[in-house]
Image (spheres, helix red, strand yellow):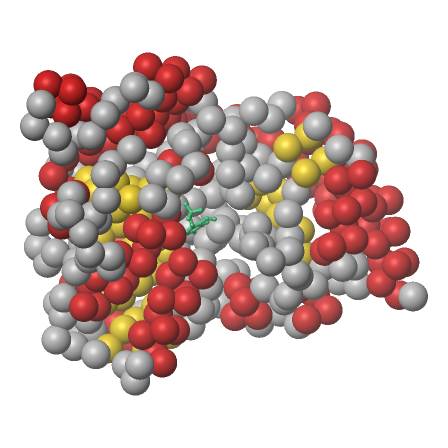
Amino acid sequence: MVYLDHAATTPMRQSAVDAWVEHAGALNAGSQHAAGRRANAVLAESRERIARALGADPVEVVFTGSGTEANNIGVRGLFGASQSGRVVSTPIEHPAVLEVVKALGQTGEDVAWLPVGRDGRISDLAALDTPAAVAAVMWANNETGAIQPVGEVVRRAGSVGTPVHVDAVQAVGHVPVNFHELGAVTLAASAHKFGGPRGMGILLARRSPVPQPVILGGGQERGIRSGTVDVASAAATAAALEEAVAEMEAERARISDLRDTVVAGVEAAVPEVIVTTGEPRLPGHAHFMFPGANADALIMLLDAQGIEVSAGSACASGVLRMSHVLEAMGYSEREAMGALRVTVGRTNTRDDVDAFLAAIPEVVERARAAGAL
Ligand code: PLP
């Protein structure tokens, strides 16, 4: 199998599996007895290692059940902690942010959308000049890989006192992320995107303002995220993140080389292809549009040859709709319905890229022929 869908999820690193197995027997970190204290020591150490890797203080690390949950707490929680009823965001957010912002909008709040250009990047920050309860902006887009000007967003929002939540789920472990240098109030990450376990998210949350909890309960994780913490997964996440950060520089060069080979190969071999975005982008992302082809057909035809890619996001319903990201970038339905995301990761080699490049010309031709019927 040739797995080129690392942005959807990436296999767990061996270091994470080992850490998980080592601590699988950890009990409730909130218990006062010796077993609880042992679990809590592992949790505290994991928190410290994650904080160090992301330029945060240990107290700022909040374990959650997913990147989705971390985003919900960041956006809804900062909104709830403010007197203002205004929200600023972008139309290219992952649904974990977009749906929260839209839901806030439906309750009569005032939502301002930062516009996005044809290159998939925010093109105008003026909406940040009016104070808001929260500005929610992604570090890097999960479909195109386009890196957003999050530093500028934080500076501009900060000058009028607006707290910023950053969805860094695609960025953490792949490009350098330093929470204190960035200056955001909250930041979301997800372990399964950098070789940790699925079902473990991280919310970095400054001491103040504290996001209001989304779910209520026993008050774990500073009361921001109640629920007994999965200690083994926290340890596995710390191991995966440390390894990802340690090898980041070398891997970024190797992976972006493979990605550039994918892009150049497709451009040379397939007529009428749109390469969706350029630099700055995530190292592993290659995103194309093949107008006239249907992404479902492209994916199935590649899958039949053992090559696994996606249409842009791993859609839960399995029903392909036009991507809201490509729509916001100004692409037509005909263009966007032929979208294909190829994401290179840690386990890939040149052989994987060659297998994809050998298959893609005929796959596009057949998908276009099927689309024309
Ligand atoms: N935000 C972005 C940018 C993502 O790519 C994803 C996952 O695809 C999420 C949030 C959600 O993370 P999780 O799968 O951990 O809920």
Residue occupying the point 51% across, 29% down: 11
Q: Image check: 6 left or right of 69?
A: right
Q: Quadrant of the C terminus?
A: bottom right
User: Between residues 57 and 74, which one lies in front from this camera angle?
Assistant: 74
Going by the image, does 115 lie left or right of 306? left
Measured along the vertical axis of the image, is residue 296 above or below residue 282? Answer: below
x, y percent for residue 243: 36, 22
Q: Is residue 274 above or below residue 304?
A: below
> What residue do we see at 66% from left, 24% from top?
350
Which residue lies at the image location 38% right of the left edge and 61% below the top edge?
A: 97
Residue located 87% across and 51% down the image: 365
**Residue farthest to the bottom, as pictured:** 108
Q: Quadrant of residue 34?
A: top left
In percent of width and height, residue 361 lies at 82, 44
Counting from the top left corner in percent of width and height, residue 141 is at: 46, 53
Q: Quadrant of residue 173?
A: top left
Residue 256 visible to an observer of this rendering: no
Residue 159's quadrant in the figure?
Answer: bottom left
Task: Answer yes or no: is residue 309 visible.
Answer: yes
Quadrant including the N terminus: top right
- Say which of 289 and 126 sits in front: 289
Give the tally of numbered discs: 0
Side of 211 relative to 108 (left or right): left
The residue lying toward the viewer, choosing from 97 and 26, is 26
Q: Position of residue 140 (x, y in %)?
A: 42, 51
